[in-house]
Image: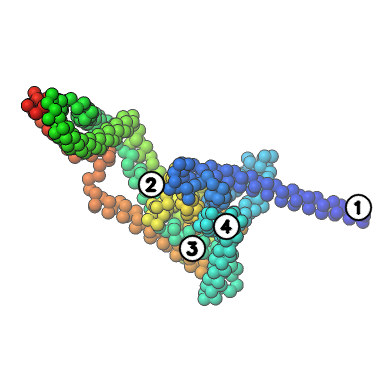
Amino acid sequence: MTSIEENSTLNASEKAANEFYNWVRQNTIAFLLFVSLYSISYSLLQRFRKKNKITDVEEEEDDLYGIDNLIIIILCAGGLAMALAGFLLWPFTMIATALLHNEIFSGNYYLTWLNAELLVTLWDYAFIGCNISLFGLLPFAFFYSETDQLRTFFAKARETLTIMLLVGMLMYGFIYTLKKIFGMSDVDELEMLNLFTCIGGALICLKATPRGYIEIFSWISRLPLRPNYRRSLKEKLKRYKMDITVWRQRLENLDRGLRSMYGVNNMSRSAVLVPSTESQYSYSSEKLYASMHGFANNIISNRSMNLSNSRNEIIAKINKLEEEEKLLRKDLSHSPLYRNMLFIVLFIVSHFIWLLILGHILYALMKSLLVDDGKDLENLEALIGKQTVSLLGFGTLNDITLIFCFTSATIIGVYSISPFEKIRPRLGKMTVQQIIANVTVLLVISSSWPALVRVLGLTRLNSAGPYENFSTMINIGYHLAMAFRIGTLITTVFSTLEYYVLRMIRNPSHNTDGISRRPYNHSRFYQSQRDRNTVETNLNGYFFHHSPPDHHGMRR
């Protein structure tokens, strides 16, 4: 009996030690993944944030190098890291599942840390981190940026926490009221927040995803080049060279006029006035010289100012033409054959992937309409094969490709629709408010992304953690999933028809190489000899010529 008790004690201690080691390993891996994502997020925000000059007085309030805005950047980097974690949950889970079920990698020593418990832990941490960032870090960053900048850090932090507490009480009252209205008293507040987040992400996807694919298709449609592309570019390059030559000639004419003007303006009084030997005319001559010299100076200063402005405009035009000439020389290196082959490949692949996504969504919709969730799906799954976890038998790679394309189309489409077009990320030009807005939008989408991907049927794997309760926690979740599938199909079909049909009706003659076919008019750049000398003629009209002096001592 003693040996049995000792063995049971040893087994219990070994089990507790294994659980402790598993807990430490899971948290260590999760922490390392978070540090990696945080480093990537912080470096991205550093590249996109606005670089203000020290001497810029107008931008002192938005100085991102201050300690206050550094705190905001740190908080936004944490939110962006959790947004990336939400987007990468499904691809990481699919790859890990494929490795665990593969006979080659299942017994690998370096993959012993990879198990189902680790995946569930990562899903839980991603859910908690996304909600903390969305309802904690980013509101704190926003309210902190709106506080008085002249106050101390602790005073601003206390004011920010007070505002967040008041807003949190309002949100709790709003959620409690909705629960009573819809009869959802048994639903937890966190599940309600998750439901609202999923609804917000679904509404954004309904508008943004079809628009994102239209943007991708339009970019692909600009790839093909005509066979006479190089010849057209060479002709346009010759025209640019001629324009640059003409504008340089005009610049030389203006410089010549300015030199002659300043030469007369700075000439000595002897060029205009010859002193008389008779003293009775000296005073009147001096007075006449002063009045005429002042009048001439006013006219010359006005003329010189106009010529200087014209000279700056001509220099700006020359610089612009030279930049366009450089771009044309760069475009000459593009091969029409390579671009056309790339267009064919991308056109086929993109449309095939888009049709696959629509097929997955339609399959999920038909399955939810014809088959109940509680019934056995063995007969239905036998139609597409039991050995795979995705539609049409393409496996894990197919699912990852579809999710990646769907995510890319959604993110591209978000910054193409009108509400979010103003906050589109730009390198080195984003202010604090724009950074907070971008991270908030990405967090809303990524928080709902694990549930939306499963609802659309882009994968056959089940969600883990709190995300698996989205469609089954209440009846409204089932109806919302149905509405989201139907809405996605309708918006996608109508957006595609609008892009292809209406675009062909409105623009029947589409120029593929992007080169204008309008006749190029050179007459606006050329001047006759009379027009070229107009400036000098007008200027010399105000000058006193060196004629022989009259009896008053003045030159005619």
Q: Residue at x 40, y 43 (%)?
A: 349
Mark 3–mark 2 distance (CA, rounded to whole Å): 25 Å
Judge depth for marks 1 and 3 and give the one in front. Answer: 3
Which part of the image, by quadrant, shows the C terminus? top left
| Residue 341 seen in the figure | yes
Q: Residue at x 39, y 52 (%)?
A: 421
Q: Mark 2, residues whose alpha carbon is within 10 Å: few (<14), some, or many (≥20)?
A: some
Q: Residue furthest front?
A: 280
Mark 4–mark 3 distance (CA, rounded to whole Å): 33 Å
- On the image, which quarter does residue 309 sit in? top left
Which residue bears the numbered disc 4?
Answer: 156
Label pair 2/4, CB-CB below 8 angstroms: no
Q: Mark 1, residues whose alpha carbon is within 10 Å: few (<14), some, or many (≥20)?
A: few
Q: Earlier in the sequence, mark 1 or mark 3?
A: 1
Residue 522, x across and y down, in percent? 16, 34
Label pair 4/3, CB-CB below 8 angstroms: no
Which residue bears the numbered disc 3?
Answer: 199
Which residue bears the numbered disc 2?
Answer: 216
Above or below, comparing residue 540 to residue 475 in the picture: above
Mark 4–mark 1 distance (CA, rounded to whole Å): 65 Å
